[in-house]
Image (cartoon, rainbow, N blue to C red):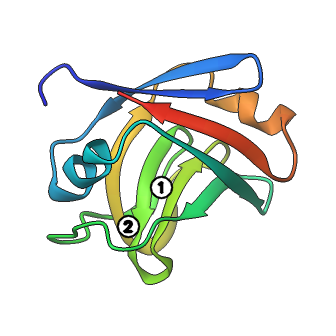
Amino acid sequence: MENQQLVITFGDEQLKATIEDNATTRDLIEQLPMTITMHDLYNREKYVEISGLAVEETNISHYSKGDISYWTPGEAFVIYYKGNQEPLNGLVKMGEILKGVELLANYPGDIEVTISS
């Protein structure tokens, strides 16, 4: 998985994310490419339920802007486009969008997203 990235496409935008080497991320990559409808929550994150991803352990207890995580209690794949170091239990960090994540704020409500590697 070294140097592998996720490509997240929505509207006319394309974001690239670095990824973590963990069981959850590897499990997601095996299912790519996928086109999903992500929902907005609290004007800070886009999420979609993806049941059954492997989880060895939750590895963080907070999220930051740009983080891509799997929230285990709700089996949700989440992209955080606002916020910084906010506490939230049950997260597995899957990766990070280093540039442009704030563009998701321009797409309120549900949005169709394609994820590829």
Quadrant housing the N terminus? top left
Q: Residue at x 29, y 35 (%)?
A: 19
Q: Which of the two residues, 46 or 111, is positioned nearer the viewer here?
A: 111
Instruction: Name the kind of residue labelled 2 in the image.
Output: Leu
Q: Residue at x 42, y 73 (%)?
A: 51
Determine the secondary structure under disc 1: strand
Vertical position of residue 28 compared to residue 90: above or below:
above
Q: Is residue 54 left or right of residue 115?
A: left
Residue 90 position in % (x across, y down): 37, 76
* Residue assigned mark 2: 91
Vertical position of residue 111 compared to residue 39: above or below:
above
Q: Is residue 6 left or right of residue 88?
A: left
Asked if the residue at tag 2 contacts the one at tag 1, i.e. Cβ–Cβ closer than 8 Å, the answer is yes
Residue 31 position in % (x across, y down): 33, 48
Residue 114 position in % (x across, y down): 57, 35
Q: Which of the two residues, 72 or 10, is positioned nearer the viewer here?
A: 10
Select label 1 or label 2 by which is in front: 2
- Badge 1 density bin: few <14, some 14–19, many ≥20, Cα 10 Å: many
Q: Is residue 90 left or right of residue 115?
A: left
Q: Residue at x 85, y 32 (%)?
A: 106
- Badge 2 density bin: few <14, some 14–19, many ≥20, Cα 10 Å: many
Q: Which of the two residues, 117 or 89, is positioned nearer the viewer here?
A: 117
Count of picture labels: 2
Mark 1 or mark 2: which comes first in sequence? Answer: 1
Q: Which of the two residues, 113 or 22, is positioned nearer the viewer here?
A: 113
Quadrant housing the C terminus? top left
* Residue assigned mark 1: 63
Instruction: Name the kind of residue labelled 1 in the image.
Output: Tyr
Residue 89 position in % (x across, y down): 41, 76
Could you tell me how far apart the alpha carbons at marks 1 and 2 are, in whole angstroms?
A: 8 Å
Determine the secondary structure under disc 2: strand
